Image: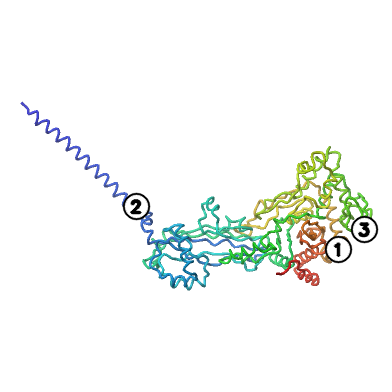
Amino acid sequence: MPDYNASKFYMKNSYYSNRKYIIIITFIIVGIIFALRLFYIQVIDRSYTLSANNNVLRYITQYPARGLIYDRNGKLLVFNEAVYDLMVTPNHVKNIDTTEFCTLVGIDKAGFIERIEKARKYSPYKASAFEKQISKEAFGYLEEKLYRFHGFFVQPRTIRKYPQSLAAHLLGYIGEATQSVLDKVPYYKSGDYIGISGIEKSYEEELRGVKGMKIRMVDVFNREQGSFQNEKYDTAAIMGKNLYTSLDAGLQAYGELLMAGKRGSIVAIEPSTGEILAFLSSPTYDPNLLVGRVRSKNYQKLSNDPVKPLLNRALMGQYPPGSTFKIVNDLIGLEEGVLFPSTFYSCQGPGTSPIRCTHNHVSPLDLKQAIQQSCNPYHWQVFRSIINKKEYGSVKNAYNAWQDYVTDLGFGIKYNSDLPYELDGNIPESEYFDKIYGKGHWNAMTIRSFSIGQGEILTTPLQLANLACIIANRGYYITPHLVRSVGSPKSYIERFTQKHQTKIHSQYYDFMVEAMFQVVEHGTAAWYKLDSIPMCGKTGTAQNPHGKDHSLFICFAPKDHPKIAMAVIVENAGFGSTWAVPIASLLIEKYLTGTVKRKDVEQRMIEFNMISKP
């Protein structure tokens, strides 16, 4: 008889034996998986090695050089100069001679403690800037002794330099990225530089390049021992793209010379392309002042200067256009059929009402004579005929039509150019007058100051220069812009090649060209006409509630196939013919002939100083 208990014991042992083999096999499989994983992370994937060796490896950001900036003739306007940031990793700073270190860097002990605490607050384990923008001369001395100070190393980078010290407002400047930028744009890290103004801001993505990274092995004495893994994990920085601008450096420098000691601005444009030839705001400043370790101190000083040298008047200055705006109303009147070249109005000089003339002249006079003499009463009649045109049914409808024409001519709008912080001036909506005077309670008489470019109308120098371009082109403009191409001198920017055709027919521009030619030949600008260059222009004297009148002049030359159009504003200088006209004529003579023969006029403009010296 079989032993039942023995059989049961045998089966139990067999069951546990099988479980043992399953467990052994499971451990073997797990062991193989771990072995394979260890092989992968130690031999194939070196990222774990990098992480484990953070304490002996130094990661150095390779900052790319920003793109260079050239003028239209290939002259270098902005280049880069090497500087060095002294970096610190707080937890690596041990057993150093603080006194010797402070002497080496040029700071006191309190400054050392302050910088270390700031770096520790950023991160005890990550490197951050201890002292920024050390010159290459100071770096040479520092480099010899830095191995004594654990936790410190030097990181190279570049800053901007300006060989000709001009066009500060146009070129702009760079500075450290703010926290708001760091939060929005992952590319930037604390301490990175970014374009703050000018084309440095507009073309930041093109100019900045691409950052790289170097990994270096460091011994216990803080000395580099060479690259890690034969530079396998290093990435090279890629330099930013160069900008090729339309600026004429010689014309820009001459304009800044003529405007020294004055408040105002000059904008000069090539009409057929919309390319900016000169663009200046006065008072200006040396752009090298906002570079390097002195930037913060100089920026504060410039900000507190009462003459406001940081203000870009050419883009952000908003002025009544004065008599330069009369030709806008004339063009609208001609297009609307309420004005003709043969239209005569009378003028009784300073005794005329409701708008008086500034001087006595022939009367009655036709349109060309009225433009030539800049007659206020004549242009009041022109404006009134537009606003009172019966076909519109109401003053408000006629005003809205007038406003559409004015906007079409480039006023009250931004151009979407490559110049940041542009203001749009002011051409009031009809609802503005409804609110002030009540619906149906205002008329042409209420807003009569618009007939001579006064009242609530505000324009920028850029808009006035663009008006000169429209007339020079007989009815169109191309968006004013500074950069011709990016990366290559021939890669033109497509959006800056499109024509903006205005609503006014070309025949009226032909008439206006002739009228503006007479302004220079026999009218208010005749004193400064050029013998060899037929020039067209319109003077303006803009009333200023804060002081003396502003002197204005818009012009273009030559009369046929114009090469340059311009607006000049000299603040608080009186009549347009006194200061704005001679400055513009000198610039045109310089640009078109390469020289200036009227040295007496040039000297008088240079010596004229309206800004009180401290």
Above/below status of 207 relative to 14: below
Tell me where residue 97 appears, x and y as whole percent.
41, 70
SS for dot 1: helix
Q: Nearer the viewer, residue 84 or 521?
A: 84
Which residue lies most toward the left here? 1
Q: Nearer the viewer, residue 412 or 554?
A: 412
Q: Is label 1 in contact with label 3 (beta carbons under 8 Å)? A: no
How far apart in space, not on screen, are marks 2 and 1 (Cα)?
A: 85 Å
Residue 608 left/right relative to 150: right
Tell me where residue 351 appears, x and y as whole percent.
92, 54
Q: Is label 2 in contact with label 1 (beta carbons under 8 Å)? A: no
Q: Amino acid at mark 3?
A: His
Q: Which quadrant of the structure image shows residue 357? A: bottom right
Query: Circle 1 sits on which residue?
Result: 526
Q: Which quadrant of the structure image shows residue 338? A: top right
Q: Can you see residue 568?
A: no
- Dot 1: few (<14), some (14–19), or many (≥20) neighbours within 10 Å? some
Q: Residue at x 53, y 58 (%)?
A: 192
Query: Circle 3 sits on which residue?
Result: 361
Above/below status of 84 relative to 353: below
Above/below status of 354 relative to 550: above
Residue 136 left/right relative to 316: left
Q: Can you see residue 406?
A: yes
Q: Is label 2 in contact with label 3 (beta carbons under 8 Å)? A: no
Pointer 1 or 3: first along the chain: 3
Q: Which quadrant of the structure image shows residue 573? A: bottom right
Q: Which dot, 2 or 3, sits closer to the camera?
A: 3
Tell me where residue 80 appears, x and y as whole percent.
57, 65
Q: Nearer the viewer, residue 149 or 372?
A: 149
SS for dot 3: loop
